[in-house]
Image (tube, rainbow, N blue to C red):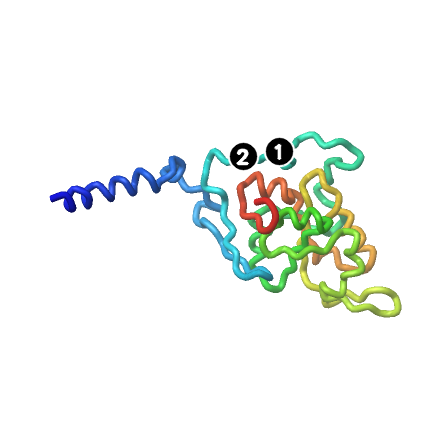
Amino acid sequence: MIRTAIRATLPALALAVAVPAWAEEPRVGLTPELDSVTVETRSGPVEIRRAQDPENKLEGSWALTSRPCPEFCIQPHEPAEGVATIGELELIGMLQDPEVIVIDSRTPDWFAGGTIPGAVNIPYTDAVDQLGELGCEIDFDGWDCAEASAVALFCNGLWCGQSPAAIRRMIEAGFPAEKISYYRGGMQTWRLLGLTVTGGEG
């Protein structure tokens, strides 16, 4: 008799304890048809999805809106002629494409604090020196980038000049502008959408 009563109460208790309030809300997807994607990283596969808690908010330095110029000015939509500016869904598609290299062009301290899953760190200060990792070959005149990989660069956000600086330096060194995409929203917009971050503070 006691066992039956315990068994009858267990499912109700499990439901009361296990379901957070936000879990009953509508799902927070990437698109109406797509909840998440899995991308390969150097540490293994990672699922990219949005935080499901509708009360989730940006905190700390990511919540700042007014960063002073000239160091943190609003970046132009097009950092250089011929470069495509992209959004989150386009970047996610590139992360799933093994032919594309997604580059976090921030300095290593920023990268260590959290990045987009699957991105590799090539600091904007080293962008030209590391063109060999992007399919370019050194020759007598500098770099031959005829066989270069398609790349997408990002940094901290709309106010961050690190990836635009890297893009301009790469083009000056011979990297084809048409093979470069610029994710202008960067880490601040990625975090604003509640998307998965790897490393550092999530």
Which secondary structure, mark 2? loop
Residue contact between numbered discs 2 and 1, judged by CB atoms under 8 Å = yes
Residue to which mark 2 is pinned: 57
Which image quarter holds the N terminus? top left
Residue that sits furthest to the front in the current view: 2
Can you give x and y, in whole percent of width and height, for residue 156 in the image?
68, 43
Along the horizontal axis of the image, is 14 left or right of 171? left
- Is residue 89 visible to the viewer in this orientation of the structure? yes
Q: Give the answer, above or below, for where 199 lies relative to 12.
A: below
- How many circles with numbers are drawn on the protein? 2
Mark 1: amino acid? Ala
Depth order, front residue of 197/95: 197
Q: For the view shown, which residue lies furthest in the right direction?
A: 140
Is there any visible trace of residue 167 in the rendered image? no
Between the C-alphas of marks 2 and 1, the distance is 8 Å
Q: Where does label 1 land, which residue?
A: 63
In the rendered structure, which amino acid carries the disc numbered 2? Lys
Whole-percent x and y of residue 117?
Answer: 58, 53
In the rendered image of this protein, does residue 176 appear above or below residue 192? below
Q: Dot 2: within a 10 Å radius of its alpha carbon, few (fewer than 14), some, or many (20 or more) residues?
A: few
Q: Is residue 156 above or below residue 99?
A: above
The quadrant of the image that shows the C terminus is: top right
